Amino acid sequence: MTHYKSNLRDLEFNLFEVFNRQDIMGSGPFAEIDVDTARTILSEVDRLATGVVAESYEDADRNPPEYDPQTRTVRLPESLRRSYQAYMDAEWYRLDLPDELGGLHAPRSLVWSVAEMVLGANAPLYMYSGGPRFAAVLWHEGTEEQRRLAEIAIDKRWGATMVLTEPDAGSDVGAARTRAVRQDDGTWHIEGVKRFITAAEHDLTDNIFHLVLARPEGAGPGTKGLSLFLVPKFLVNDDGSPGERNGVYTTNVEHKMGLKASTTCELTFGAEHPAVGYLVGDTHDGIRQMFLIIEYARMLVGTKAIATLSTGYLNALEYAKERVQGADLSQMADKTAPRVPITHHPDVRRSLMQQKTYAEGLRALLLYTATVQDSVRIAEHAGDAEAAKQAAALNDLLLPLVKGVGSERSYEMLAQSLQTLGGSGYLQDYPIEQYIRDAKIDTLYEGTTAIQSLDLFYRKIVKNNGAALGALMGEIQSFAAAEPEDGGFKEERAALAEAAGHVNAMVESMVTAAMSSLEDPRESYRVGLNSQRLLMALGDLVLGWLLLRQAETAADAIDTARPADHDFYTGKIAGARFFATQVLPRLAAERTMVENTTLDIMDVPESAF
């Protein structure tokens, strides 16, 4: 047994009972993957994830990678190397690659279901394995020579990184100072220092290629002046083998509170000898190109967080069923009453149901977003540009929820998972303390929650003229207003409709402030003071909707369900009702706070904090 507890049943429930992925498999752009194949893939990855992939998770945390400052190399623990090799040998990374690169081009809903299991079992391993996915971006964006290099990188399983952050700039990517100097042979020399670069140095692969944002000499300020460069650790010989060492070195590996098995590096370019780079696509379009990776990374981080919460909850649930402590609350006066498992105690039940609904609701959000990504592919395959555009806009709207809400709620609920174990949860005898340490980074990775919330409001709502949000809210409100023949979930639908009204009012209040800021710039502070509140409220609304969709599916199936599934469906119904009555009502208070926001806090002197 390993630490990781998967939830294959819930993955398949979402895929094939709620979102009906069987209707798109085996035809159109997904002709190579039918339902039976998809189920086999899920089963095989589940076996791999709960076995050899998860085996090194604890050991690699206790015995993290070792950095040698003399050679500027990193040695990973042998246990992680074994897990990584087993995963790469299975070649499931090919699910996410196009046909031309030896991939299966599977539905995104299947790809992210697989990713959830691997990330939940051993997130550092999955992050080291990103080379093929990054190479696919290079293949799409690169010159003919770069496309050939991408094919070599996939064939040889080279590692890869995305290189944005600088020590002084932080999240202000446009303030980057790393520069690129054009050479007579058409290459570029990259000069500067980057920080917090994941998997920038390790001994798992023969080569690592870095995708680096740098400012060409003479380029303008801000993000528009940045270009994307391919900078391999080793220059590549004509036969595809690693050649001369390039002038990019890891000059430090960060010591972190968690996710210790994943190397987080400082990279120095051109300090000792030239760091040769190649302009991706031979075009200065760096931010657009890098966002192809950033958006994938944000989805990955959200998936990682959600996967960690799921296994954290399931570990807590197992412990709670086995831990006998105290008498039933209804028999507290009877000193001879039998001791009971803590699942009998009301507050433990409340906490477990809260963990369950967030874990399963967030999984539904993740897979709903993935189905929207499927829709983009289907529309493109059919040549329907307008449908593809609308689906892409909805995907853009949902990404901050997957990443921002997924990471914040997962970290919050993991604390509840630990609390379920009491003092034992604080010990390294159980995995939850490591889950919490490893999950905190998810609220910071690829843009903090504040950045996700501003992105949601300004780029995904205001800039989109509310079109994608309107489409999503329309679907939620239509669901809430529907009246099923059996009259089921009437009160829960009413709670959902009321919550949707509160979120709409929050958006309207913030849009008013944004419009007012055109005349009074200080009004933009009202947006900044409430952007995270809106992000989390919209997240809870969408989760409530998806949980109710699941409950309806479960209610339709429960009467004819196998005995093994009866309790599963019962849990879906109970969870949706709990969320509707215990979580959604909070949105009324959130709306009140948004509408009553003043700017007083912005006038408080710094010395008063």
Image (cartoon, helix red, strand yellow):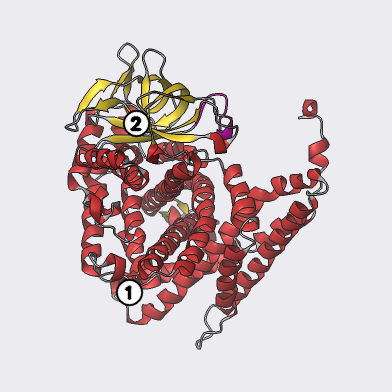
- Which residue is at the far bottom? 485
Q: Is residue 245 above or below residue 571?
A: above
* Residue situated in front as seen by the camera: 308 or 347: 308
Instruction: Kindly identify the residue that appears in the image at 72 percent across and 57 percent down.
Output: 511
Q: Is residue 373 left or right of residue 88?
A: right
Residue wearing tag 1? 23
* Residue situated in front as seen by the camera: 137 or 495: 137
SS label for mark 1: helix
Mark number for residue 261?
Answer: 2
In the picture, the quarter occupied by the N terminus is top left
Verify CB contact (< 8 Å) between mark 1 and mark 2.
no
> How far from the left and from the top, in percent, is residue 545?
53, 68
Amino acid at pointer 1: Asp
- N-terminal-most mark, 1 or 2: 1
Q: Nearer the viewer, mark 1 or mark 2?
A: 1
Instruction: Kindly identify the residue that appears in the image at 71 percent across and 45 percent down.
Output: 529
Amino acid at pointer 2: Ala
Residue 271 showing in the rendered view: yes
Residues in magenta, as a range: 165-174
The quarter holding residue 107 reads bottom left
Mark number for residue 341?
Answer: none
User: Would you call the spot at circle 1 few (<14 residues within 10 Å), some (14-19), or many (20 or more)?
Assistant: few
Q: Is residue 140 left or right of residue 180?
A: left
Q: Is residue 444 left or right of residue 609?
A: left
Q: Is residue 519 magenta?
A: no
* Residue situated in front as seen by the camera: 362 or 574: 362
Disc 1 and disc 2: Cα gap in Å? 40 Å
The quarter holding residue 132 reads top left
Q: Is residue 49 left or right of residue 210?
A: left
